Structures are given as C-alpha cells and as structure tokens.
Amino acid sequence: MRKVIASTFTTLDGYIDEPQNWSFDYRTDDATQYALDLMRRSDALLAGRATYEGFASVWPTRPSDEFSDRINGMHHYVVSDTLEKADIWGTSTIIRGENLVEEVTKLKQQAGGDIIIYGNGQLTDALSQAGLLDEYHLWVHPLILGEGQPLFRRESKAKLKLLENKTFSSGLVILVYQPEQ
C-alpha cells in the first residue's frame, strides 16, 4: 500500500511559513540527497489549494533537473472546494473536501509510489485524524524566528512514534514520525 508522507520545513521554535526565506542557508549536499530520495519514492503530490497554486506558479519555471522534472511530471491532487478546474500545472485532479477521506483511501490502495505532501496544515490534520497520514518528515532548521505560522494546531493533536532521525552537516535535523492509531 502507498504511504502518504508530509514533508515539512520548520524552525526550531516550530514555525513553517515562508521557508524560501530561511531554509536555503541549511541546504547541503546530504540534505539535498535526502530530499531527492524522498521524491524518487513518490509519484503523486497531494496539496491544498494555496500550496498547489503556489507550486504551480514556481515549479514549471525552474530549470530542468531531476527534482524539478519529477515534481512537474507527477500527478497532482489538489484539495479544494473553490477551484473549478485544475489545469495550471501538469496532470492535476481536484478532490473536494467532503470526498477527501474516500479519495485518499482509494489513492493509497492503488499501485504506485508514495504520495507526498509539502507543508503541514488542515489537510495533514484531516488525514491524520482519519488514519490516512503515514509519516511526518519534519525538517528542523537550527533557527529561531520567534513568530509565524505554527507547525501544529489544536486540531493536530496526535500521539507519534519516532521512526528515524538524521542530522546533516548544517545542523538541520530530520525527524520522521508515524502517527499511532
């Protein structure tokens, strides 16, 4: 069965917004390789509307490399009750919020690679509560912002089991957790 994996950049004090403004200082060859290995295991991207639209405006314009080609070429699933069509980025399918659990359950049962989610919000909360989120990959950057969008919210409440931790030369640490059902 396919896994649903949430991969999220966070600061040490637990903020996740605008990682493009603070995460690149910690990107090293070993961290890049980890990200690429995670991407190679995945063949579908699941995103909320805002993330989908943000990614769709950036990724197709990036120079060709293995990561860009992979994320642009995979199937994109966007969870939205407001989008009428998802035709701005490769092959994309809209999943309505009321059908989220049913549709993700079907996706997990299909043959294929993992299903990747970048970020952590209402989508990951809903999937975790439904028992459909298999792993959190938390990229903890050695940086304190002091404010911003929090990594978790009250709705995120869950008991987790640590599966793996990896420290990179920049001080970036990846913690891989599995929600306990």
Image: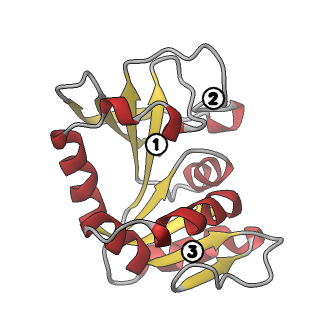
Q: Position of residue 105 (x, y in %)?
A: 52, 73
Q: Is residue 52 left or right of residue 144?
A: right
- Residue that sits furthest to the right in the current view: 82
Q: Residue at x 32, y 33 (%)?
A: 175
Up the image or down, 17 lies above or below 129; here it is above
Q: Amino acid at mark 2?
A: Pro
Q: Residue 100 occupies which quadrant of the picture?
A: bottom right
Figure colour scheme = secondary structure
Query: 93 or 131, which is in the foreground?
Result: 93
Q: Residue at x 17, y 42 (%)?
A: 29
In the rendered structure, which disc, 2 or 3, sits on the residue that comes first in sequence?
Answer: 3
| Label ID, residue 77 | 3
Which residue is the site of mark 2?
A: 150
In the rendered structure, which disc, 1 or 2, sits on the residue that comes first in sequence?
Answer: 1
In the picture, the quarter occupied by the N terminus is bottom left
Q: Residue at x 47, y 46 (%)?
A: 181
Q: Residue 86 occupies which quadrant of the picture?
A: bottom right
Which residue is the site of mark 1?
A: 8
Q: Secondary structure at mark 2?
A: loop
Q: Position of residue 68 (x, y in %)?
A: 35, 67
Cβ atoms under marks 1 and 2 closer than 8 Å: no
Q: Residue 161 occupies which quadrant of the picture?
A: top left
Up the image or down, 152 lies above or below 82; here it is above
Instruction: Check disc 1: other Cα within 10 Å, few if <14, some if 14-19, many if 20+.
Output: some
Q: Position of residue 171 (x, y in %)?
A: 26, 21
Q: Secondary structure at mark 3?
A: strand
- Tell me the distance, in whole angstroms, between the alpha carbons under discs 2 and 3: 24 Å
Q: Amino acid at mark 3?
A: Tyr
Q: Amino acid at mark 1?
A: Thr
Q: Position of residue 36 (x, y in %)?
A: 24, 57
Q: Secondary structure at mark 1?
A: strand
